[in-house]
Amino acid sequence: SLDWGSNQPGCVLWWAVLGYGRLYIRSELKFQYEDVSVVAARIHRRDLELGLHRGVPTYADPSIWAKTGVATKTHLQGESIGETFLQYGLSMLRADNDRITGWMRCHQILRDAPDGQPWCLVHPECRYLLRSIPAAVSDKANADDVDTAIDDHALDAWRYGAMSRPHPL
């Protein structure tokens, strides 16, 4: 799952859905001030390190498909970030950006499975995500949402992954 960032940090998380329903976040990539081509190359490299083949979909922030560039009367010109990722061979899907349901889903996957461990486990090397989860605070205007004034980029990538429909038993 991916939350794009350019001037702000971006984050990619690699998820595994294990056979008994447990979710496992195995790896993360934090980036900032990098071109799409550089981020795409880093994603491909990490995929290879993890033994993944091309074609594994990445659920990404829907805003990466927004058109930028010169507007005409009929459309915006220019290639979106999502389209550029596709050009570099990454399989990108629009994540569900329902924030309230997404945070509820994140809470659900943190609940304990019958063995007493959370349904979603995070590898210790995913330090950005592990630092971000306990730092999350509720938005003052909407307690069901996370305050976006904090560094919420790893949290958004986590939410997009949770909303991609992996479901603990």
Image: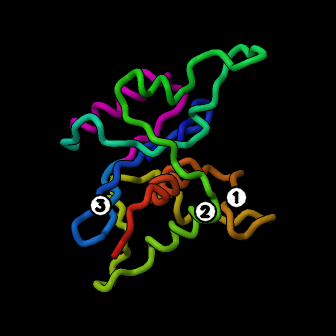
138 to 47, vertically: above or below: below
Numbered label tally:
3
- Residue 123's disc number: none
| Mark earlier in primary sequence (3, 2) | 3
**Residue at 68% from the left image edge and 63% from the top image edge:** 145
Vertical relation: 5 (above or below) 17: above
Q: Judging from the image, what secondary structure is the residue with disc 2 in?
A: loop
Q: Amino acid at mark 2?
A: Ala
Closer to the N terminus: mark 3 or mark 1? 3
Residue 89 picture location, percent across and down: 34, 26
Q: Secondary structure at mark 1?
A: loop
Task: Please tell me whether residue 29 belongs to the stretch shown in magenta.
Answer: yes
CA gap, disc 3 and disc 1: 28 Å
Q: Closer to the observer: label 3 or label 2? A: 3
* Location of residue 15 by image quarter: bottom left
Q: Which residue matches tag 3?
A: 17
Crowd around label 2: few <14 · some 14–19 · many ≥20 (10 Å): some
Are the residues at dot 2 and dot 1 in contact (C-beta closer than 8 Å)?
yes
Q: Nearer the viewer, mark 3 or mark 1?
A: 3
Marking on residue 147: 1
Residue 16 image-quadrant placement: bottom left
* Mark number, residue 136: 2
Percent position of residue 124, x then y: 33, 58
Q: Is residue 37 magenta?
A: yes
The residues colored magenta run: 28-49
State whether the magenta stretch is mostly helix, strand or loop.
Answer: helix
Could you say which is closer to the camera, residue 76 or residue 8? 76
Relative to 67, does residue 54 appear above or below in the rendering? below
